[in-house]
Amino acid sequence: MAKEIIVNATAEENRVAVLNNNKIEEFYVERTSAKRLVGSVYKGRVESIMAGIGAAFVNIGLEKNGFLYVDDIIEEGSPYIDLLDEEMDDEHRKKDRNTPPPKITDILKKGQEISVQVVKEPLGTKGARLTAHISLPGRYLVFMAHDTHKGISKKISDPKERKRLKAIIDEINLPNNVGIIVRTAAVNHTKDELKREAVYLYNLYRHVEKIASRKSAPSLIHEEYGLIQRIARDNLTEDVNFMIIDSKQEYKKTHVLLRMMSPKIRSKLKLHNSPQPIFEKFNIASEIERIFDRRVSLPSKGYIIIEPTEGLVVIDVNTGSFAGKSPEDTTYITNREAAVEIARQLKLRDIGGIIVVDFIDMDSKDHRQSVLQALLNALKNDKARTKVLNFSQIGLVEMTRQRMRKSLEGVSYNTCPYCGGRGTVKSLVTMSIEVIRLLEKRLKAERYKKVQVTLNANLKDYILQNYKKALELLGRNSRCNIIVNGEAHLHVEDVRVNIG
């Protein structure tokens, strides 16, 4: 497996492509005008308390107040969900679920100041999701304030390595009221490396506390790293060949971070000096342009269609021009290819929420199980939490994927102002009939000597070719001169009526 990380950094935005065998596996975009909030720590002020749902609204200086649940305040609270939830061990999850929360009114009062961390970006009309349990991630460890738990990432499966790492963190001398989670990147790393990072993260937290004591709410007291440095911290591991950046400034910042957190890995960091755009150099520019295409081709000449809707994402699988040895064979091969590609597309587009996959119907139970297993296997490397249900009675596979922020498509695109998000516009026939109906309504309500209608140029030509007699009849009956004008720039559904 050959992995590379390609970084394009500009003043306006940073883009990162993670390649696996020369194919884009993950793609991230972060704009300077809309910085990510997850991981940043604020000193906030409680604006209101909703006792009925056990939550509070906290002003942290953003446009919308953040949302803080009672079980994100009490002991054994939630750590840095977006980055770390996939690394929490099952014992810690269970402990959190089984701890009965007290009443929020016993913990918080209106006007109270509290340090909180953003664990979920604001989405739509919702403010940021907050926690009062500050978690500071390093390369190998996660420092957790107000949480005495010491655990090992559930993704570290080797019993001997888990035992070694557990012994190391038990020997690290930290205060009793803080916790540590060992991340997967810590595998095969030394006690000195882990101890050095633990001390660094603890000192960083003390610095955050000091800043919080000096500032009044609402204010930012610790800002999470930007996209490029987060990728270097979390993704630049031993199995990555190199990380290459086309900006000297970002290269230097990342080099400083790695020197502090992981000196051994610094040799994997490269600077792109060529005048050729970096994505073109690695032959991925065209693939990035196609990331949001509705239709995604499969190796067998089949394809999938990805349709985001307001409530969920629908994925349809089609055989296209592929023909196997038999109809069942054709269907099975296409569905297996689709399962792998769907898992890749979910990561690539950062799709979250409810996802429904309409695989092609298969008669064989073994084939259905094989396709489902292919999907599950392909999702194993996805850091976002996923839950996949078995085939339904009508052949659908329903799943959910953790959604922490807007999808990549949501960041890059707005709803089409012309079709209103429908993906379609009214036909020329429909619009012609609507224009005539509109004129009939206006001329019945009041008499006019002259009416001018301005339409899209193509609609004007169509209506005069096919509905000229209807317009003339309407004009005679209403004793009105109807004049039809065309403008090329007008949208096909934009009809302008001027009287006189």
Image: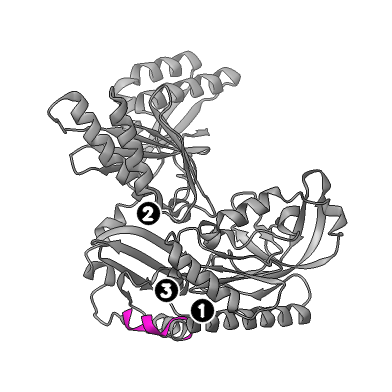
Hey, what amino acid is under mark 3? Ala
Mark 2 or 3 closer to N-term? 3
What range of the chain is rendered magenta? 260-269
Hey, what amino acid is under mark 1? Leu
| Residue 65 visible in the displayed image | no
User: Which dot, 2 or 3, sits closer to the camera?
Assistant: 3
Q: Residues within 10 Å of mark 2 (few under 14, many from 20)?
A: many
Q: Is residue 236 magenta?
A: no
Hey, what amino acid is under mark 2? Leu
Q: In this figure, which residue is indicated by the disc labeled 1?
A: 194
Residue 300 versus residue 263: which sits nearer the camera? 263
Quadrant containing the N terminus is bottom left
Residue 185 versus residue 113: which sits nearer the camera? 185
**Which disc number belongs to residue 232?**
3
- Please tell me whether mark 1 sits on a helix, a strand or a loop: helix
Mark 3 or 1 closer to N-term? 1
**Which disc number belongs to residue 348?**
2
